[in-house]
Amino acid sequence: MLSSKELSFRDPGLMPIWNKVRNGIRLSKEDGLVLYSTHDLIGLGRMANEVSRAKSGDTVYFVLNQKFEPTNICVLSCKFCDFAVKKGSPEAYEQSIEEMLDILNPDIREVHITMGLHPDWEWQHYVDMVRRIKEAYPLIDVKAFTAVEIVFFAKKFKKTHEEVLSELKAVGLRTMPGGGAEVFSERVRKLIFNQKIGAKTWFEVHRKAHKLGIQSNVTMLYGHVETFEERIEHMIKLREVQDETGGFMTFIPLAFQPGDTGIKTKNNFTSAIDDLKTIAISRLMLDNIAHIKAYWVMLTAEVAAVALNFGADDMDGIVGHERIAHDAGATSPMQLAKEKIISIIHEAGKVPIERDVWYNPLHIYPAEGTSIVSKMPYLNSVPFYSNFEPELAEIKLSPLVPRVFGQFAKEGKVDAGPMSLMDYVASQDEFEMLDYGVAVSGKAYSVLLYSHHDWKHLSGKTIGLTAESSTSVELLRVLLEKKYGVTGVTFERLHLTSGQNDYTKFDAVLLIGDEALRRWKVGLASFLNVYDLAEEWYEWKKMPFVFAVWAVRNSIPAAHKEAIRNALEGSITRSKGHYDELGREHAKRLGLTREDLAMYLNAFTYRLGEQERSAMEEFLKEQAVLA
Ligand code: SF4
């Protein structure tokens, strides 16, 4: 992140670390240890909160999920595990697939399955478990089986790890939970879970999963026999593999619950200070992991709420039938109602967003009196937000792709942001336009049509369309019909999560934003023709194309409008001249260089003048004829 924000610290040792963080320089192991040793808890939390804001705005995500542990019978006996028993034990239980299905309901969006390593269950049972849940509830995504379970299945059923993962993916496995390795330290593994797989095998399984398009989480069980150094090494190992695969979504620090495990810790439970420090340090160390989860089941709801200002941007939703932590003595109630989660997030001064398994927003729940500003999560919008510091605390930022912003704006839940031109036109009665937006004269590099055919031969063909924006889709229609005279095209919307799309079934595919940029240098599958829609428009009309305009809801208080306008003007002004550094984080993720970045951002106009307004009119005229 690049930030001009000045923070002050009671511990002067934190200043050099903050300077590194705000200049986008990765923290070292030594930095991590300084953070663990600091007495300046508040300073540490403020740094982590700034990093979290740069990534997720003021948003805290939650997903309504149902946890299943269908059996506690396990062939292993890990020393720290208070959950597993042997077959025949009076505490042993087995839950059938029917019993699992009985518990589910259509409000749930994610099922989380982990369990003991059962000595007798057949492979087909696990496949059926995933398949039947998916068949009964197509909208529920299945997050199942840790790397330990995948390795167990592979050995027991004589399959490779890839075969196990592919067969599960084919019946509906979407993501994997992050447990199983506990702490990536051989010393700790030998001491308390020597029967389990080590870090090397754990990462091998996750690498293979990521290659197959199965994203995963990663946990760290802390507060037992591990040292601070081993915690930091855990984070650094994870960071290195994430650089390679990009497949980890969320880091979840898990506070150890001693229960009857017999493992002696200094105090029986981790302290709230240790929990908060660990959340904050993980946010600062893991610059390439998008989300940090406050796992309230183990932290307690009170500490989890504070953690939302210490770098965490995700909370578990309704967690039903959570046994592992409770068998070890966790004190949180078994189910926090959705309203309770929302009120915890509001108390923390954040914006609750209910999400799906890939962090696509489903619903937003703004607190009374706040105005929500949409943070477009694309590289081309970085100048709007890199220094966006509204004077009023009531102004909150939430990352939303244009189409979701449009939908939430229509529901009256989001009040300002760079609105897709088509959405603005549809809601002009409720929104006023500011003099800012995203426009380009020539190539946009990030609104691309990948096609097997040239324009003239797209008639009668099927085009897969980005699910993220309606303006680029309308631009495509205008170019097809008005510029090239092509009709009879069938359009099909793509999935919001790129990894879930099969592009090969289309004759052409329209991608926008970072998804298009990611393919700037490498292309897309076997599509030979690549058309930049903004360039096509410019060559045709000799006018810029305006993709988005900043719009503000008429009904929000005048002071909020003013604060938004000032913050925006400040950010655009301060960002100018720093384009090569600004989106460094994005660039790395997208495989672009500093030079690419500067060229890309310099192509855009962020202040809209007469020329842009005339271009908008011209486009809307062309589009209206089609509509
Ligand atoms: S931690 Fe997992 S593998 Fe180890 S005993 Fe418990 S359930 Fe079995």
Image: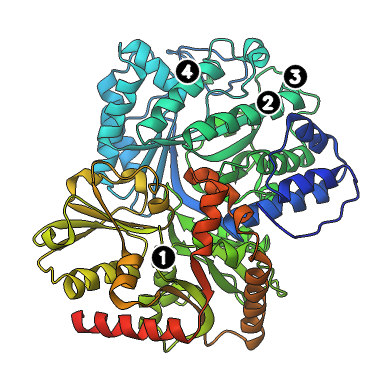
According to the picture, the residue beneath numbered tag 3 turns out to be 264
Sequence-wise, which precedes: disc 4 or disc 2?
Answer: 4
CB of residue at label 1: within 8 Å of ligand 1? no
Q: Could you tell me the amino acid type at mark 1?
A: Val
Query: How crowded is the residue under tag 3: few (<14 C-alpha within 10 Å), some, or many (20+)?
Result: few
Q: List the residue tagged with mark 1.
A: 404
Q: Residue at x 68, y 29 (%)?
A: 222
From the top left corner, tell me how far across and down residue 326 is, in percent: 58, 34
The quadrant of the image that shows the C terminus is bottom left
Q: Secondary structure at mark 1?
A: helix
Q: Which three-letter amino acid code belongs to the residue tagged 2?
A: Glu
For mark 2, give the secondary structure.
Answer: helix
Q: Nearer the viewer, mark 4 or mark 3?
A: 3
Q: Secondary structure at mark 3?
A: loop
Q: Is residue 601 left or right of residue 101?
A: right
Question: Residue 90 has which mark?
Answer: 4
Give the side of residue 64 with respect to residue 530, left or right.
right
Question: Mark 4 near mark 3, Cβ–Cβ under 8 Å?
Answer: no
Measuring from the top left, give residue 289's x and y in whole percent: 57, 41
Q: Is residue 608 visible?
A: yes
Q: CA distance from mark 4 to mark 1?
A: 51 Å
Q: CA distance from mark 3 to mark 2?
A: 23 Å
Reading the image, the residue beneath label 2 is 233
Q: Secondary structure at mark 4?
A: loop
**What separation in Å lies between label 4 and label 2 (alpha carbons)?**
40 Å
- What's the amino acid at mark 4? Pro
Q: Label 3 sits on what residue type? A: Lys
Label 1 Cα neighbours within 10 Å, binned few <14 / some 14-19 / many ≥20: many
Disc 1 vs disc 2: Cβ atoms closer than 8 Å? no
